[in-house]
Image: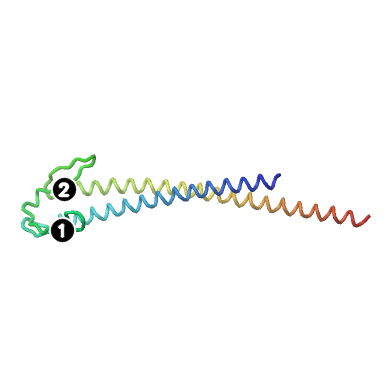
Amino acid sequence: MMGGGGQQQLQQLSQELQALDEEIESLKAEVSDLNDEKAEIDEAVEAIETLETGSTVQVPLGGDAYLRAEVQDIDEIIVSLGANYAAEQDQTTAIESLHRKQDMLDEEIASIRGQIEDLEEESDEIEQQAMQAQQQMQQQQMQQMQQMQGEGDDGDDE
């Protein structure tokens, strides 16, 4: 009976570990997506800093199609504010807005990394519990085997 209970405990710990690993991977993917978003913002800032009125650019139309266009006024940049709102901003203000977005992304990334660390610590604790449970099961099996051998030896002596 004890062996079955130990096996059940190991199975439960294994399921908990698997759930934690899946959650950790999901959070790591989220961090990766946020880092991609930061890289896109870097590209936008670099473009805004280097472009001038009259510059020729390729504007994405979607579906991997682009249109060549001329920047008519570098101080008419439309920047997303979030929640489906956008505002027209001059070059400097647009760059400042994008840097603020990056700061918010950095905070979110730091928060998620903290969650990942917490989950990894929890995972380590569960792994330790699983190792201890497995060792206890092995010790119990060894004791049972020794008892069975001892009983067999007692019967031979008579």
- Mark 2 / mark 1, whichever is N-terminal: 1
Left or right: where 132 falls relative to 92: right
The residue under the point 76% across, 51% down is 144
Q: Nearer the viewer, residue 27 or 67?
A: 67
Type of amino acid under label 2: Ala
Q: x and y percent of residue 5 in the render?
A: 66, 44
Type of amino acid under label 1: Tyr
Q: Which mark is residue 128?
A: none
Q: Which mark is residue 66?
A: 1
Tell me the distance, in whole angstroms, between the alpha carbons under discs 2 and 1.
Answer: 23 Å
Residue 145: quadrant of the picture: bottom right
- Quarter of the image with the N terminus is top right
Q: x and y percent of residue 116 in the render?
A: 43, 49
The residue under the point 13% across, 45% down is 89
- Quarter of the image with the C terminus is bottom right
Q: Nearer the viewer, residue 51 or 157?
A: 157
Left or right: where 36 falls relative to 43: right
Left or right: where 59 falls relative to 23: left
Q: Name the residue under label 2.
A: 94
